[in-house]
Image: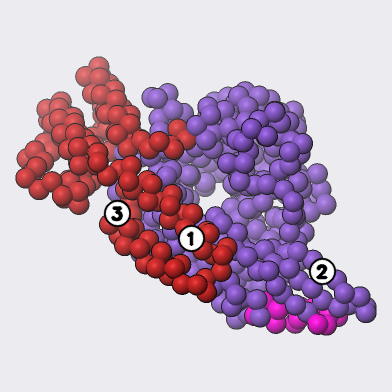
Amino acid sequence: MKPVVPDVLGELAALILRNAHPDVSPSDRASALGLTAALLGLAAESWDGRVQHLVQENRAVWALLSEGSSLLGTAGPGHPANETDLRISGLELENARLRQALIDLQARLEITGGADARALNAQIWAELTQSTQRRLTASSPV
Amino acid sequence: MSQDLEPRLAAYLARRMPQASHLVVDRLQRISGGASRETYRFCLTWTEAEERRTRRLILRRDPPASLIDTERRIEFEAYRAFHGSAVPVPEMLWLEEGTGPLDHPFFIAEEISGYEAAPAVLWSEAYLPVHAALAERKWTILGQIARADPVALGLDKVMYQPAPAECWSRELGHWEAILDKDATEPLPIARAAIRWLKANPPPPPPRISVVHGDYRTGNFLFAPDGQIHGILDWEMAHLGDSLEDLGWSLNPVWSSGRGLAGGLVPEQDAVAIWSRSSGQPVDPAALHWWTLFNCIKGQAIWISSARVWMDGGNREPIMVYPPWALQNAQDRAILKVMGHL
């Protein structure tokens, strides 16, 4: 989630404090607090599963990149994700590195052609679909 | 805070209304939502020709940093072009492009009051029976926008007029550049969709049309009888392919999880209404392209919002809501339109 949750929660805390002042107009307060509530709800939804989902996704993308490097004869994705640091910020950094490499791989597969490339591309689409399932919120319109 | 604006707004209006005396601005109230403009309603009371008069008005002011960078003159002129036509819009009154009077550019318009805009209201029990009627009006009006002649409306003087063949590349290039500039993380789904869009361009439109740019549930004023009384938020208006607007209205993120176009009717019904009203047949492949394109446009808007917040340009919570609530949904919409979901 970008902006990252801790930064947003900090800003929301300050916003709630400002709205605790009696001079804030009711309409400004209603607008601020309504949105604050919605954002707190979204942050709460992501809380429990975020690390689990990032670890799952990083492993899945790393496996696809490894397969891609074998198929195309290119450099691999490097060492598997270092899972000794399970802070969300660390996992997200690794996630960004892997997903950027996945973009490059998929673009190459699209122009490579051939049954193996198409099969790997189908696996990538399946993983991308799964990635949106991991990030799904209860109020998602799609 | 809103209260500080009232005296400054009154001073500005006093200068713009030399015929008025005893001018009072009150009941200024910020309207929720609106990540690209601050929107307020207020009441203006004044004396003119020895008569006390009152009018309810809307102030739309640029925020310090916006979700969408647009020229307020273009929005102002788009509203003005359609005022009094079959496309219902509020009357535009004053445009101020300087920063002196209220710190940021703004315009003032009449308020069309007494109607609803919030999608949540649209899904309430009271409105379910009129969804078909609302859809008829919604896509009929969009067809009327498509049918309008931008030159006759004078909009070619304030909006760039693209050649038909460049409509798709101009729009895709614009929104891809925004993604390139503002992306907060790699976006494999959006990037794959962009590659597909570039490899499979749509045919040029038969003519250049006015494109509202944000025609969706939430941007029109509706009534319990299924009528629509105002089309709002023209800030992304431009000239181009009318299928662009139809495609935006069919973006799955506007379905509110109901699996219907705009949450109202099946997609083929919406397309049929639009086609009847615009007088244009719809090429399904071209519409598919524009619907997918609009998923990219949506993603660029949500991500820009995150970027503005992260860069400190605007720390309002409304800037966080689109990326948090819609970025993943927009990815799922891309997957759905491309047949992967």
Range covered by the magenta-colored residues: B8-22
The chain letter under disc 1 is A
The chain letter under disc 2 is B
Does dot 1 land on a helix, a strand or a loop?
A: helix
Q: Colour of chain A?
A: red
| Three-letter amino acid code of the residue under disc 1 | Ala
Q: Main secondary structure of the magenta part?
A: helix
Label 1: how many Cα within 10 Å (few below 14, some 14–19, many 20+):
many
Residue B273 in the image: above or below residue B164: above
Asked whether the beta carbons under mark 3 and mark 1 sit within 8 Å of each other, the answer is: no
Name the foreground residue: B227 vs B180. Answer: B227
Left or right of B285 in this view: A43: left
Q: CA distance from mark 3 to mark 1?
A: 19 Å
Q: Colour of chain B?
A: purple
Q: Is residue B337 visible?
A: yes
Where residue B137 appears, as percent x and y from the top left, is 74, 35
Circle 2 sits on which residue?
B54
Left or right of A2 in this view: B147: right
Comparing labels 3 and 1, the label whose residue is closer to the camera: 1
Does dot 2 land on a helix, a strand or a loop?
A: strand
Where residue B13 appears, as percent x and y from the top left, is 73, 77
Circle 1 sits on which residue?
A32
| Three-letter amino acid code of the residue under disc 3 | Val
Where residue B191 appears, as percent x and y from the top left, is 35, 40
User: Residue at the top extreme?
Assistant: A115
Quarter the C terminus of chain B occupies:
top left
Name the foreground residue: B321 vs A43. Answer: A43
Q: CA distance from mark 3 to mark 2?
A: 47 Å
Q: Earlier in the sequence, mark 3 or mark 1?
A: 3
Residue A4 is labelled as 3
Q: Are marks 2 and 1 on the same chain?
A: no
